[in-house]
Image (cartoon, rainbow, N blue to C red):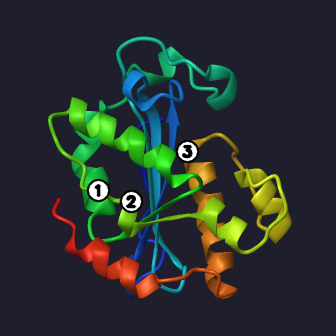
């Protein structure tokens, strides 16, 4: 699979949220590499505006294949992270970045940006974590992505693929937005708009 970008799914209001999911060679951001990245863009109401994903060519072993099912031959024709960086910046810039355990994604992104000779803005104050929202909303454990999807009735397909998990996280965010469980939305949007990319 090369780069996947959907035709624009919905026209009208611009994207407000960028839901990201990464598959990596390991848990330690400084010692690991991203092997797959997906971003689902949503407007302020939670309507999906666009989707994008790509495998990422790396040097070395893919690690964690038993989880993400990505094998080294699958990455041979894929773009490098440096090749994908302009697309990633374009899809994150000015948007509230959302992830399930978003700190994991932000740490791995920051490490890849450093390796590519770039600086990722500090997105922590302009991001949302769906696991943290689930905790605040009182969802029972486990608060894994699958557990949260089951508790809220959100379909979870394509587990441990970047696009599958990003779509599920986006659907979870949409659920929380509809329930009024996302606090400080305007403040987060202002912070995201001010970040220097």
Q: Which residue is mark 2?
A: 124
Q: Earlier in the sequence, mark 3 or mark 1?
A: 1
Q: Which residue is mark 1?
A: 122
Q: Nearer the viewer, residue 64 or 125?
A: 125
Classed neighbour count for the residue bearing mark 3: other residues with Cα under 10 Å, few (<14), some (14–19), many (≥20): many
Q: Is residue 153 visible?
A: no
> Residue 97 appears in which quarter of the rendering?
bottom left
Position of residue 41 measured from the top left corner of the image (x, y, whole percent): 44, 68
The residue furthest top is 60
Position of residue 125 measured from the top left corner of the image (x, y, whole percent): 37, 66
Q: Which mark is residue 194?
A: none
The C terminus: image quadrant: bottom left
How far apart marks 3 and 1 lie (CA) works out to 22 Å
Q: Which residue is mark 3?
A: 162
Q: Earlier in the sequence, mark 3 or mark 2?
A: 2
Classed neighbour count for the residue bearing mark 2: other residues with Cα under 10 Å, few (<14), some (14–19), many (≥20): some
Q: Is the C-beta separation of discs 3 and 1 under 8 Å?
A: no
Position of residue 8 measured from the top left corner of the image (x, y, whole percent): 41, 70
């Amino acid at each position: 699979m090369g780069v996947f970008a959907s035709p624009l799914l919905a026209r009208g209001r611009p994207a407000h949220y960028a839901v990201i999911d990464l598959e990596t060679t390991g848990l330690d951001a400084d010692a690991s590499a991203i092997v797959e990245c997906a971003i689902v863009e949503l407007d302020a109401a939670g309507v999906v505006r666009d989707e994008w994903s790509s495998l990422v060519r790396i040097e070395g072993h893919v690690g964690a294949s038993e989880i993400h099912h990505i094998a080294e031959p699958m990455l041979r024709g894929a773009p490098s992270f440096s090749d994908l960086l302009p697309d990633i910046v374009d899809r994150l810039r000015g948007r509230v970045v959302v992830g399930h355990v978003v700190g994991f994604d932000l740490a791995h992104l920051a490490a890849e940006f450093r390796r590519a000779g770039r600086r990722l803005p500090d997105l922590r104050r302009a991001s949302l974590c769906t696991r943290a929202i689930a905790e605040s909303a009182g969802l029972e454990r486990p608060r894994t992505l699958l557990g949260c999807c089951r508790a809220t009735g959100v379909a979870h397909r394509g587990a441990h693929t970047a696009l599958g998990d990003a779509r599920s996280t986006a659907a979870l965010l949409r659920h929380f937005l509809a329930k009024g469980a996302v606090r400080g939305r305007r403040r987060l949007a202002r912070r995201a708009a001010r970040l220097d990319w």
